[in-house]
Amino acid sequence: MSDESSKLDYGYVNLPMNVDEILGKDFWIFDYITADMLPPFTEPVKLTASISIFVRKGSFKFSNNLIVYDFEGPAIVNIRNGETLQLIKISPDFAASFIVMSKFFVEDIFLHINDMQNLSAMSRLPVAKIPLDILPKFENLYESLKMVYSDYKNPQILKALQHSIIAFYYRYAYRCYDILTTGADSGARLSDRFIQLVKAKFKTERFLEYYAEELGVTTKHLSRTVKAQTGYSAASWIERFLILEAKILLKSTNLTIQQISDNLNFPTQSFFGKYFKKNVGLSPKLYRNS
């Protein structure tokens, strides 16, 4: 389908209609979408990019990985790449903005927010209410991101976008998840405790048996609960923290690859190199120079 301009009651918006074109970008923003612009969703869609949706107003019902959520705006919805989304119902007054982010764009953000107390809640819950007192801050964020995104002469545009989002999480967005953390059920609390423990011990403890024993549960129960709550397996969380730490050390320090391997307690530099390449697709040296 070719590109078109759509005349809407708020002005003209240039919308690339080719979905592959949008998903092929590291970052793409669309500032305002209404109910009449959305086609009926009859089938679930598996996403190849991460999408963050700022629901300004209206009610909406959707399923994420077959779990149904029924919510009222204002709210923030985050769907990760690889997850399945189906829009079931929206109200006539529905209005939202959204950004599309590649896997690598999101991982770079995770490098900076992996110490947030609400990380587990953000991972396990795709939707959260926005407190009314910070609603204008979300409006300002999208205005700011649009301005940054339109600055084509800036060679650091992606970094500027990432750091704008990171700063916003630390200043305002974390509050959307505070109440979800406070009112968490037993499964959510176990996932929260597990992730906090992994953050503290991932350099030296790689096996689930250690974490299960520390948390007083079986490895089977831990794996099943963490997967159900966060969408990632318990083993994947250990791996994610390990790879992200390796990326940080490679990009932001002058440590040799041997020193980084030792820092992360790999038995040999060769083993570290193979492990890193398997997960990242590049050797540590090529990643450092990329």
Image (spheres, rainbow, N blue to C red):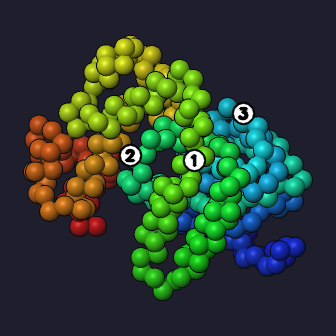
Residue that badge 3 annotates: 68
State left or right for residue 252 relative to residue 220. left
What kind of residue is marked 1? Arg
CA gap, disc 3 and disc 2: 29 Å
Q: Secondary structure at mark 3?
A: strand
The residue that appears at 64% across and 68% down in the rendered structure is: 140
Q: Earlier in the sequence, mark 3 or mark 2?
A: 3
Residue 266, x across and y down, in percent: 15, 39
State left or right for residue 143 relative to residue 265. right
Q: Earlier in the sequence, mark 2 or mark 1?
A: 2
Picture disc at residue 58? none
State which quadrant residue 289 falls in: bottom left
**Mark nearer the viewer, 3 or 2:** 2
Whether residue 280 is visible to the viewer of this picture, yes or no, is: yes
Whether residue 26 is visible to the viewer of this picture, yes or no, is: no
Q: Secondary structure at mark 1?
A: helix
The residue that appears at 14% across and 62% down in the rendered structure is: 254
**Mark nearer the viewer, 2 or 1:** 1
Q: Residue furthest bottom?
A: 153
Picture disc at residue 115? 2
The answer to which of 251 and 102 lies nearer the viewer is 251
State which quadrant residue 268 falls in: top left
Residue that badge 1 annotates: 175
CA gap, disc 2 and disc 1: 15 Å
Residue 17, x across and y down, in percent: 71, 68
Q: Secondary structure at mark 2?
A: loop
Circle 3 Cα neighbour tier, 10 Å, few/some/many (<14 / 14–19 / ≥20): some
